[in-house]
Amino acid sequence: AEGDRQEEGRAEGDRQEATVGPATVQEAFMRFSGVYSKRIDPSRAHPKMKRAGFVSMTGRPLDSLDAHIDLESFNALRYTIRVHKNSVHRTFLANLRSDNWVTGGQNEDVWQVVLHDGQKDGDWDGWKEVEVPLEAFVLTWRGKPVAEAVEMGKSKVIGVGIGLLGGDQHVEEEGEFCIDLRRIEGIV
């Protein structure tokens, strides 16, 4: 059954893994969980790999006739999320991947915005709705904001996802993380 399907991904780092899949059949939502690690296992990593510490999941359109999600008529996205007790101190990002509409190529631009700030949002129980204006998404390259002002091609979105903030700008504590996603909907 579709509700029973689960996918796992493993990164090159030591013990870095994430699981994406529905948690139960009774309540439909996607769980993104795993172990965050910045260690690199030299025996498994590519020789050019110099740093680790990024984990993300991205969903893509299922319709093979049109590989784009058109967000042109929306002003914001509403995420219904539940951050688990072991992760309330973490910072999660929402991300959109789009074709580069300026060059017209398949070069994926990654736009990110903070979805849950572990330092500011604190603890909560249950589901929370977070509205994010589309203008709040910032173009990034390898997790860092791009300095030049670029407009998102809202009609050319090819992926929607959630990630855990890491890298050079933010030191995230190693260990388990878990966030549930019930819904993402466009707001006019």
Image (tube, rainbow, N blue to C red):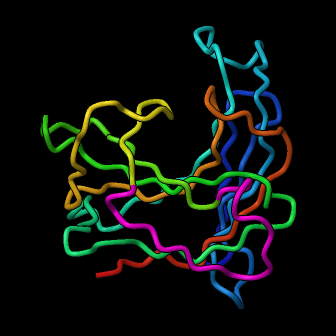
Which of the two residues, 50 or 140, is positioned nearer the viewer here?
A: 140
Query: What are the residue bounds of the magenta stretch?
Result: 117-136
Query: Magenta includes 23?
Result: no
Rendered location of residue 24, percent (x, y): 74, 81
Query: Residue at the front extreme?
Result: 120
Q: Is residue 125 magenta?
A: yes
Count every numbered label the image shows and give the total.
0
In the drawing, does residue 37 fall left or right of residue 46?
right
Left or right side of 41 for 73? left
Depth check: 64 or 19 in front? 19
Quadrant in which the N terminus is drawn: bottom right
132 left or right of 2 in image = left
Residue 67 locus on image (x, y percent): 26, 58
> Which residue is the extreme one toward the top?
47
Residue 111 position, x and y percent, is 39, 47
- Measured along the vertical axis of the image, is residue 177 above or below residue 84? above
Q: In this view, does 89 lie above or below 62?
A: above
**Residue depicted at x 61% and y 72%:** 181
Q: From what the image shows, is residue 48 above or below residue 126?
A: above
Q: Say above or below: 53 vs 98.
A: above
Q: Position of residue 46 (x, y in %)?
A: 62, 15
Image quadrant where one finds the C terminus: bottom left
> 40 or 93, which lies in front?
93
Left-right relation of 64 to 30 = left
Q: Which residue lies furthest to the bottom in this view?
A: 26
Give the residue drawn at x 75%, y 39%: 172
- The picture quadrant where one finds residue 85 is bottom right
